[in-house]
Image (spheres, rainbow, N blue to C red):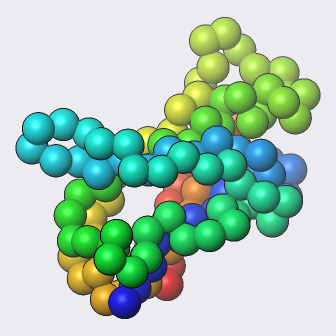
Amino acid sequence: MGKLSTHVLDTSAGKPGAGVKVALFAVRPEGKVLLKMDITNADGRCAAPLLEGDSMKAGQYELVFNAGDYFAGQGVDLPSPRFIDLVTLAFGIADPAQNYHVPLVVTPWSYSTYRGS
């Protein structure tokens, strides 16, 4: 079986995004369902896969990263309202037997993602 993992890279500081709150939602026809909440470790990663084994299912998902609070906690001078605050990455899992790594590369002014393995 595959697994879902993530990590946060703070490219404005050139380091992992440690202490970022992350929420994983399943997106279903009846609405979003919170599956897991976690906080990134010193390496910017969640300590365990967000999904694995029987919980790894095909479908639509969202990862929500609390980037604004992370940058505020780093002492970054942010405008009010924040330009980047909650970052939502919407993605699909087509084959639950594969590994899906969905990282967030972020600054206070921009973000990107990609599918890793």
Q: Position of residue 72 (x, y in %)?
A: 79, 26
Q: Is residue 10 visible?
A: no
Q: Is residue 74 left or right of residue 4?
A: right
Q: Is residue 94 left or right of residue 80?
A: left
Instruction: Give the answer, above or below, for where 94 lies relative to 27.
Output: below
Instruction: Give the answer, above or below, for where 32 lies relative to 101.
Output: above
Q: Position of residue 43 (x, y in %)?
A: 81, 65
Q: Is residue 21 left or right of residue 102?
A: right
Q: Is residue 21 left or right of residue 92?
A: right
Picture quarter with the N terminus: bottom left
Image quadrant in which you'd find residue 98: bottom left
What residue do we see at 50% from left, 64% from top? 50
**Residue at the limit of the structure toward the right, as seen here:** 75
**Residue at the limit of the structure toward the left, as seen here:** 29
Q: Nearer the viewer, residue 40 or 109?
A: 40
What residue do we see at 11% from left, 38% from top? 30
What residue do we see at 9% from left, 44% from top? 29
Q: Is residue 71 visible?
A: yes
Image quadrant in which you'd find residue 2: bottom left
